[in-house]
Image (cartoon, rainbow, N blue to C red):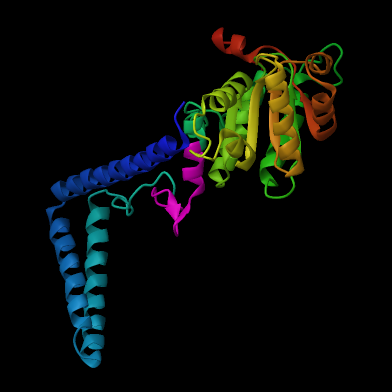
């Protein structure tokens, strides 16, 4: 596992690379524009000269500088108007030469006024967990792409509402969770058989919160405890990289533990799980747990102090219905 300082350096290099990539793309767009409308290149050159002349004017006497600055501003405004007209006539959008950032807040530098932007913190978290790149995953798994029609309107035996009605209720809870996240938010537990959308909805919530500038750590249960164990037993210098994975787990705004119950059931994982749940509960930092286990199976697998935390402090949301993965594979669709 990489040390914390190695991860930090890799994150710095990552942000350097996306800035370079953005600048390269902007240069390519500029070249394309100049080829299509050569007059715009001449205008840009003149705009640059206006900036130089404005700086020179500022070095003159105050009265002359003021008059020169007014005249230069009028010239600059005129050049920009002409440039926009030429671009529009050639079919180029007005913002064609505007840089495109992955994060508009820090403009892909990773820092705002010398402090880490949330996107930089998020990148460090993802790199620490073998690159579980939430932003890439959530491009396709988000509330906009969620399809309620995969859930049947037919009543299921033993349930008081149809799978579709149940999912509409769960979806409403998830939307409310993201809407009021800045306030004291409850913990959620998604449970039920595999293939019913539990992980998908975790991604939906993550996407919504990442877009709002919150930090999210998503990890499967085996992945999470393997990372903690590796760090715990591979540290050779206690004074090196004092910030640990457990610090990240407790620092992120939202922790998502997927597939709880698939990790090795040892005294180590049990102790770490209780510590994670208990510490975040005390700090009022929400956790979402996704599991295929039923309540009875959770009680059988985990200690009383873990089950009491889950049963008492998490809002349970039961998933049921037909396996969506199988339906998609065979072209199934419920109207």
For the point 68% across and 21% down, the residue is 269
For the point 47% across and 28% down, the residue is 131
Q: Nearer the viewer, residue 69 or 257?
A: 257
Where, by quadrant of the figure, is residue 296 drawn?
A: top right
Q: Nearer the viewer, residue 172 or 246?
A: 246
Q: Is residue 110 above or below residue 286?
A: below
Q: Is residue 82 above or below residue 6?
A: below
Q: Is residue 248 left or right of residue 92?
A: right
The magenta segment: 105-124
Instruction: Decide whether residue 231 is among the magenta residues.
Output: no
For the point 15% across and 66% down, the residue is 46
Where, by quadrant of the figure, is residue 305 drawn?
A: top right
Q: Is residue 264 left or right of residue 39?
A: right
Q: Is residue 335 left or right of residue 104?
A: right
Q: Is residue 233 above or below residue 11?
A: above
Q: Position of residue 294 (x, y in %)?
A: 79, 16
Instruction: Decide whether residue 121 is among the magenta residues.
Output: yes
Q: Position of residue 67 (x, y in %)?
A: 23, 87
Q: Position of residue 125 (x, y in %)?
A: 52, 36
| Residue 172 visible in the snapshot | no
| Residue 46 visible in the snapshot | yes
Where, by quadrant of the figure, is residue 254 drawn?
A: top right
- Image quarter hosting the C terminus: top right
């Amino acid at each position: 596992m990489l040390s914390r300082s190695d991860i930090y350096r890799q994150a710095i290099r990552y942000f350097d690379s996306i800035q370079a990539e953005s600048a390269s793309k902007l240069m390519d767009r500029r070249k394309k524009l100049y080829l299509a409308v050569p007059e715009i290149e001449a205008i840009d050159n003149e705009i640059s000269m206006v900036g130089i002349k404005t700086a020179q004017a500022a070095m003159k006497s105050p009265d002359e500088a003021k008059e020169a600055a007014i005249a230069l501003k009028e010239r600059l405004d005129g050049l920009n108007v002409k440039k926009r007209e030429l671009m529009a006539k050639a079919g180029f959008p007005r913002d064609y030469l505007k840089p495109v950032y992955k994060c508009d807040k820090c403009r892909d530098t990773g820092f705002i006024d010398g402090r880490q932007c949330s996107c930089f913190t998020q990148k460090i978290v993802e790199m620490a967990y073998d690159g579980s790149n939430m932003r890439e995953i959530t491009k396709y798994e988000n509330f906009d792409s969620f399809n309620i029609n995969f859930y049947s309107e037919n009543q299921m035996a033993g349930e008081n509402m149809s799978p579709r009605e149940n999912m509409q209720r769960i979806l409403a809870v998830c939307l409310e969770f993201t809407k009021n996240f800045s306030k004291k938010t409850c913990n959620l537990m998604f449970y039920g058989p595999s293939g019913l959308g539990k992980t998908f909805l975790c991604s939906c919530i993550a996407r919504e919160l990442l877009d709002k500038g919150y930090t999210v750590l998503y990890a499967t249960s085996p992945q999470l405890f393997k990372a903690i164990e590796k760090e715990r037993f591979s540290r050779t210098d206690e004074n090196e990289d004092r910030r640990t994975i457990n610090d990240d787990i407790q620092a992120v705004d939202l922790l998502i533990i997927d597939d709880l119950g698939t990790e090795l059931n040892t005294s180590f994982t049990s102790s770490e799980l209780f510590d994670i749940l208990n510490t975040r509960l005390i700090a009022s930092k929400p956790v979402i747990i996704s599991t295929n286990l039923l309540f009875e199976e959770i009680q059988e697998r985990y200690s009383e102090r873990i089950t009491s935390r889950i049963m008492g402090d998490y809002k349970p949301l039961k998933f049921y219905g037909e396996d969506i993965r199988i339906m998609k594979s065979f072209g199934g669709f419920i109207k």
